[in-house]
Image (tube, grey):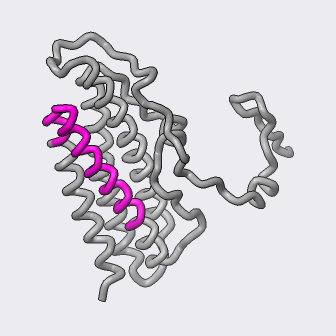
């Protein structure tokens, strides 16, 4: 039985796979990002961080949450698809990175909720917010996956460090401390991945 294209949620008809494949993928990093604090919903909490600062912190953390989820899916993409002489070592390494990144996702999401916010971890939120480089679909060789995943780890680590400084300005030492731990972990995994390029 032939498949019929499904209707998209936005009401537009589905594109054929052939036509979609011909189009170049749009750049993921938008010129301007919408202000994440503009529609932040807050729940009542006795946390003594002032409300205006909590709104800003929640917006920043939801940005990092989107990128952490994106990074996690990139780790799995590499884990599932790597091939070549270093297959078993890289396959295991990418899965270990994924496990740590999964714990970072949880830490960030739970911090958002602790501050009275809503953790926005849907695919739509990730697609809209993540500024990580797109993972190249269709690569197979170990060195290609090493290069792509090192790009993603590096971008996430840089964003985490920028956010640590922003948390310091907002006087949220707890979020800064959490992101410092995450940044250290990302740097360790970047070292492990980049070691495959250095000889």
**Count of numbered tags:** 0
Apparent side of residue 14 relative to residue 87 in the rendered image (left or right): right
Identify the main secondary structure in magenta.
Answer: helix
Residue at figure coordinates x 19%, y 56% from the top left: 184
Q: Is residue 35 above or below residue 99?
A: above
Residue at figure coordinates x 64%, y 53% from the top left: 26
Q: Which residues are magenta?
A: 150-176
Residue at figure coordinates x 53%, y 73% from the top left: 140
Which sits in the foreground, 118 or 86? 118
Query: Among all residues in the image, which is located at the extreme top?
Result: 44
Measured as percent of width and height from the top left, residue 2 is found at: 86, 45
Q: Is residue 141 above or below residue 114?
A: below
Measured as percent of width and height from the top left, residue 87 is found at: 41, 76
What is the quadrant of residue 103 in the picture?
A: top left
| Quadrant of the frame with the N terminus | top right
Measured as percent of width and height from the top left, residue 56 is found at: 32, 28
Residue at figure coordinates x 48%, y 34% from the top left: 122
Q: Is residue 77 above or below residue 196?
A: above
| Residue 156 painted magenta | yes
Apparent side of residue 59 relative to residue 182 in the rendered image (left or right): right
Which sits in the foreground, 144 or 26? 26
Query: Among all residues in the image, which is located at the extreme right?
Result: 2
| Quadrant of the frame with the C terminus | bottom left
What is the quadrant of residue 193 in the picture?
A: bottom left
| Residue 122 painted magenta | no
Which sits in the foreground, 2 or 61? 61
Measured as percent of width and height from the top left, residue 144 is found at: 48, 75
């Amino acid at each position: 039985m032939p498949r019929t294209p499904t209707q998209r949620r936005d009401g537009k008809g589905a594109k054929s796979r052939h036509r979609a494949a011909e189009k170049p993928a749009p750049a993921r990093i938008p010129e301007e990002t919408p202000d994440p604090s503009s529609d932040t919903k807050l729940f009542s909490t006795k946390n003594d961080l002032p409300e205006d600062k909590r709104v800003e912190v929640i917006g920043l953390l939801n940005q990092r949450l989107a990128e952490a989820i994106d990074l996690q899916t990139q780790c799995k993409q590499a884990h599932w698809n790597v091939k070549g002489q270093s297959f078993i070592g890289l396959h295991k390494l990418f899965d270990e990175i994924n496990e740590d990144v999964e714990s970072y996702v949880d830490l960030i999401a739970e911090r958002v909720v602790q501050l009275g916010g809503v953790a926005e971890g849907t695919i739509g939120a990730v697609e809209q917010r993540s500024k990580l480089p797109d993972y190249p679909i269709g690569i197979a060789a170990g060195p290609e996956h090493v290069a792509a995943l090192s790009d993603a780890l590096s971008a996430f680590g840089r964003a985490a460090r920028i956010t640590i400084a922003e948390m310091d300005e907002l006087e949220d030492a707890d979020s800064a401390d959490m992101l410092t731990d995450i940044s250290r972990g990302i740097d360790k995994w970047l070292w492990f991945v980049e070691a495959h390029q250095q000889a």
